[in-house]
């Protein structure tokens, strides 16, 4: 599978991912062959490119849940676009409460981890896709942190609106790989202009005060010139959660300037900066998404390659793995084993989708030792979930 920019698409190429319209109706299915008319339609969508299958590459397995996840994002994207268009016209953001509640219904009360799949973005639709992804991540984080329903609503609402200022960032700046200090100044002013669309002084749209405060604090964090200047700026638990969602979203998103980092690298990056990114929010994120799911191809620190056989809900970096070099199975939750071999990252591909189906993995599940280990992992996860439940009552 490879990423091909829109300008390089050719008839006969096979799609690795489906394409939907604004209503969520599939226009082009996976494994469809591109035609000239299809390429013209894709150009009209403003997509920066597509994931394309190699000529002899078989169609990789994908779950129905993952397909629905991508479909949800497309439908939500067009809905937030309509809302932002109205705000630009100084009109009531009709549909905002309904969109917030729908995102929370789908992602704000999960009892298990889910794959988080990024969709491709262009400078045309970056704002809308980024807002939806941040809102979904915020819903997951708020659930794990034990937020009340009202708190979840406020956080997701803020996540849908905090990026309004990007609507005013000049295209030539949006398309740059790196921003100069002058560019950053322009972006900061655009963020201020976007925030004013919500009429924070008069609260024309009767948004909860916590929504406006969260947006303001998040923008203040993002526009800070350095980490030292952030120490003097108060930031609520809601803004801390949104800042983590925003950063993870940016790191893992695909664009023309750089390949996305893996979920593993993104979580590590957040954990390595505890002064910037709240450790509790980062842990909540790590416990919401499947960072190293079963079937994921991986690189080890010693240069070997392998595959995750059984993921570890308690510690995503300590699953049961198969090493391709010696064809041996290793339990990385065993300290003696992890002292010798660790996971460096997900194998470098343009798309981190699971590439081994469940039927193939079943051949490894009959081993008695693996079964005992999996049972231990499940018990650990149950205990972890109990801790999060207790946090809800404490309103952490």
Image: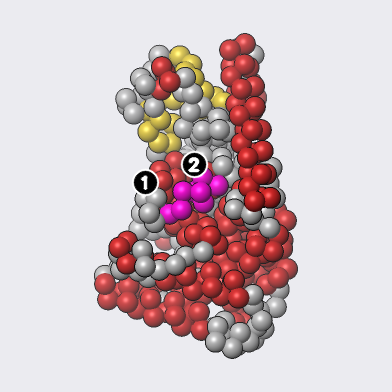
Q: Position of residue 295 (x, y in %)?
A: 54, 30
Residue 126 shown left or right of residue 376 in the figure: left
Q: Which mark is residue 272?
A: 1
Which residue appears at 61% of the width and 63% of the height? 156
Q: Position of residue 377 (x, y in %)?
A: 60, 26
Is the stretch drawn in magenta largely helix, strand or loop?
Answer: helix
Range drawn in magenta: 277-284
- Residue 279 in the magenta stretch? The answer is yes
Q: Position of residue 78 (x, y in %)?
A: 63, 68
Q: Does residue 76 appear in the picture of this structure? A: no
Which residue appears at 46% of the width and 53% of the height? 278
Which residue appears at 51% of the width and 51% of the height? 281
The mark that comes first in sequence, 2 or 1, is 1
Q: Position of residue 202 (x, y in %)?
A: 59, 88
For the residue pair 371 and 357, the one nearer the viewer reads as 371
Which residue appears at 46% of the width and 74% of the height? 166
Residue at far top of view = 368
Residue 66 shown left or right of residue 167 in the figure: right
Residue at far front of view = 394
- Residue 21 in the magenta stretch? The answer is no
For label 2, the residue is 352
Of the residues tagged 2 and 1, which is closer to the observer? 1
Secondary structure of residue under mark 2: loop
Asked if 207 appears above or below 75 in the picture, the reply is below
């Amino acid at each position: 599978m490879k990423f091909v920019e829109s300008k390089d698409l050719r008839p006969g190429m096979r799609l690795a991912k489906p394409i939907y319209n604004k209503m969520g109706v599939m226009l082009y299915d996976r494994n469809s062959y591109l035609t000239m008319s299809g390429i013209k339609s894709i150009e009209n969508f403003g997509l920066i490119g597509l994931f394309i299958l190699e000529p002899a590459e078989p169609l990789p397995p994908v779950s129905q849940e993952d397909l629905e996840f991508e479909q949800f994002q497309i439908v939500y994207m067009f809905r937030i676009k309509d809302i932002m268009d109205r705000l630009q016209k100084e009109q009531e953001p009709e549909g905002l409460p309904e969109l917030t509640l729908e995102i929370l219904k789908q992602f704000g009360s999960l009892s298990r981890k889910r794959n988080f799949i990024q969709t491709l973005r262009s400078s045309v639709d970056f704002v809308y896709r980024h807002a939806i992804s941040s809102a979904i991540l915020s819903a997951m984080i708020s659930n794990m942190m034990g937020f009340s329903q009202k708190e979840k609503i406020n956080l997701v609402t803020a996540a849908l609106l905090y990026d309004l200022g990007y609507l005013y960032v000049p295209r030539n700046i949006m398309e740059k790989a790196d921003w100069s200090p002058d560019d950053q100044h322009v972006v900061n002013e655009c963020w201020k202009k976007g925030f004013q669309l919500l009429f924070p002084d008069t609260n024309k749209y009767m948004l909860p005060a916590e929504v406006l405060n969260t947006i303001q604090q998040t923008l203040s964090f993002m526009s800070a010139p350095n980490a030292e200047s952030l120490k003097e700026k108060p930031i609520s638990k809601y803004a801390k959660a949104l800042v983590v969602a925003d950063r993870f979203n940016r790191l893992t998103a695909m664009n023309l300037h750089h390949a996305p980092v893996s979920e593993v690298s993104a979580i590590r990056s957040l954990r390595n900066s505890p002064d910037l990114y709240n450790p509790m929010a980062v842990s909540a994120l790590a416990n919401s998404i499947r960072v190293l799911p079963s079937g994921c191809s991986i690189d080890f620190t010693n240069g070997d390659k392998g595959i995750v056989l059984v993921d570890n809900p308690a510690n995503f970096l300590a699953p049961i793995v198969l090493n391709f070099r010696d064809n041996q199975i290793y339990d990385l939750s065993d300290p003696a084993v992890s002292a010798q071999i660790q996971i460096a990252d997900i194998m470098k591909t343009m798309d981190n989708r699971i590439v081994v189906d469940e039927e193939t993995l079943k051949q490894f599940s009959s081993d008695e030792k693996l079964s005992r280990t999996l049972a231990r992992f499940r018990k650990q996860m149950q205990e972890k979930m109990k801790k999060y439940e207790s946090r809800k009552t404490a309103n952490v």
